[in-house]
Image (cartoon, rainbow, N blue to C red):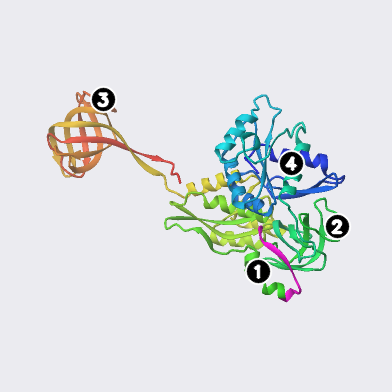
């Protein structure tokens, strides 16, 4: 866990390259919670990669809670950052032991001692600072310190006496799930106790199913899954929610009875679910993503967008390709379809060509957020800003007709421009009227503008009557782009 770009993924890749048995390296390591297993001297460690992007705070929190211990990665050339602090908070809330990995010691600007002092300010005292938290200086780029990190992890595990019972009924947690076009609902699980085998009935808070097959992170078929082993499970009716607790049931009927949420919730089809309503403006959205973790992250960042002026309403939010139903819903409700790392199926593609439904595709969550922000701002009318130009004291009134007057005076502040607006203020500074400068003259010649100290005549049109001694406050109104 740690701040973005501090080398978490590089470190995991380096460990995996050194310690994963031969075969293709499975698991997703960028914007999903990936998990894989390494082996050292006959002992095994399962690593769960919690993405560093700030939008995945919820996923990082779950990652900490499912883990037996955590590795806090801090770049030794940059030090403690915002997401470093956030990761420390999650680790403390999960109440699990952890190790500080001071990465990038190969960099010339590396200063591990400075970083440990910064970490100490966050109430994390490493052993060299008189505390109990182990710290390892390493480099994911060169591999230096990685063996020491693994040894420290084994040592902490022994000291914490991390054990479980294989004979208990299988229990665990879902760390990722998605809908595979060919294989159906799949989920990555980490068991906390017991063994999981094919043909067993499993259930979570949101779905259930009969285990069709089990695969390790390399795609190898397993006869059974054991505690702390990352395993891909096929056989769920629908993708379970990330963070769901999983357990084994005696029958499908018992699994159904054990659900704490409806199957509709598990499908993540949330028609007319409002993030935040706005009486003024509203932007309708249909969200489609490649995995539930991504979906939750998108929803989380959208919630954080300011919605005092424009409300966001999610009409549908689910995993999988854009379907014909999605396009029809977007077309009827004038919603925008946000596609995060997914495409439309053939039927939806044909329908999109015949409708005005709009699809925006993204691979990076920051881009998605910025585009939604722009869409929200486009729904707002431009804001009218009053810009003060100057003031003029009225010295003489030449003519007065209905709603028009010709008056003369001296400019006491700023400028006066032809076509500008003005407010008529009495000597007591009370507002008497508002109008516009139709024409501006100096020495009986038309001019475009005049400045402080000059005496001019103006043709005024508007409400209220101008009198000698009044102050004319000159201003213009400018349209500016509305912001959220």
Query: Looking at the image, is mark 4 or mark 2 nearer the viewer?
Result: 4
User: What x and y, as percent, mark residue 412?
Assistant: 21, 27
The x, y position of residue 205, in whole percent, is 65, 66
Residue 309, position as x, y percentages in the image: 43, 51
Residue 187 appears anywhere in the view: no
Residue range (magenta): 241-253
Q: Percent x, y for residue 90?
A: 60, 49
Front: mark 3 or 2: 2
Mark 1, other Cα within 10 Å: few <14 / some 14–19 / many ≥20: some
- The residue at which mark 3 appears reads as 451
The answer to which quarter of the image holds residue 75 is top right
Q: Which residue is mark 4?
A: 152
Q: Residues within 10 Å of mark 2 (few under 14, many from 20)?
A: few
Is label 3 in contact with label 2 (beta carbons under 8 Å)?
Answer: no
Residue at screen point 58% across, 59% down: 330
Residue 144 image-quadrant placement: top right
Instruction: Pick the residue in front: 77 or 420.
Output: 77
322 over 12 or under it: above or below = below
Q: Secondary structure at mark 3?
A: strand
Identify the residue position indicated by label 2 in the image: 221
**Residue found 63% across the figure and 68% down from its top:** 264
How far apart, in angstroms, are the residues tagged by discs 3 and 2?
85 Å
Task: Using the image, determine if residue 52 lies above or below residue 348.
Answer: above
């Amino acid at each position: 866990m740690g701040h973005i770009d501090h080398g978490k993924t590089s470190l995991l890749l380096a460990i995996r390259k050194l310690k994963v048995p031969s075969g293709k390296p499975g698991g997703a390591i960028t914007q999903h919670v990936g998990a894989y297993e390494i082996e050292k001297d006959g002992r095994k460690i399962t690593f769960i990669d919690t993405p560093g992007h700030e939008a995945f705070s919820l996923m990082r929190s779950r990652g900490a809670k499912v883990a037996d211990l955590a590795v806090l990665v801090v770049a030794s050339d940059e030090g403690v950052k915002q997401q470093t602090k956030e990761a420390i908070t999650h680790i403390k809330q999960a109440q699990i032991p952890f190790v500080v990995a001071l990465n990038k010691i190969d960099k010339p600007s590396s200063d591990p001692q400075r970083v440990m002092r910064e970490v100490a300010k966050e109430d994390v005292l490493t052993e060299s600072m008189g505390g109990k938290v182990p710290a390892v200086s390493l480099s994911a780029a060169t591999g230096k310190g990685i063996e020491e990190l693994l040894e420290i992890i084994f040592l902490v595990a022994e000291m914490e006496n991390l054990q479980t019972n294989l004979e208990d009924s299988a229990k665990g947690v879902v760390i990722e799930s998605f809908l595979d076009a060919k294989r159906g609902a799949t989920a990555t699980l980490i068991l906390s106790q017991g063994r999981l085998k094919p043909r067993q009935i499993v259930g979570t808070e949101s779905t259930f199913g009969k285990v069709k097959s089990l695969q390790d992170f390399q795609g190898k078929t397993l006869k059974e899954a054991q505690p702390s082993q990352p395993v891909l499970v096929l056989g769920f009716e629908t993708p379970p929610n990330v963070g769901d607790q999983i357990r084994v049931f005696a029958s499908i009927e018992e699994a159904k009875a054990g659900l704490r949420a409806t199957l509709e919730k598990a499908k993540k089809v949330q028609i007319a679910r409002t993030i935040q309503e706005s009486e003024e403006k509203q932007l309708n959205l249909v969200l489609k993503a490649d995995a539930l973790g991504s979906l939750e992250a998108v929803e989380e960042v959208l919630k954080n967008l300011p919605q005092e002026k424009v409300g966001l309403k999610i009409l549908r939010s689910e995993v999988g390709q854009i379907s014909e139903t999605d396009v029809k819903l977007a077309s009827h409700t004038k919603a925008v379809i946000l596609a995060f790392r997914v495409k439309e199926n053939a039927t939806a593609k044909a329908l999109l060509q015949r409708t005005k439904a709009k699809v925006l595709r993204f691979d990076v969550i920051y881009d998605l957020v910025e585009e939604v922000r722009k869409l929200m701002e486009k729904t707002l009318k431009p804001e009218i800003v009053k810009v003060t130009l100057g003031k003029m004291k009225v010295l003489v009134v030449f003519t007065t007709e209905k709603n028009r007057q010709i008056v003369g005076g001296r400019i006491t502040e700023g400028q006066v421009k032809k076509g500008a607006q003005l407010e008529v203020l009495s000597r007591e500074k009370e507002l008497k009227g508002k109008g516009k400068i139709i024409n501006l003259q100096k020495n009986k010649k038309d001019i475009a503008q005049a400045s402080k100290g000059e005496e001019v005549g103006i043709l005024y049109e508007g409400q209220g009557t101008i009198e000698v001694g009044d102050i004319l406050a000159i201003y213009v109104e400018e349209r500016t782009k509305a912001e959220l």
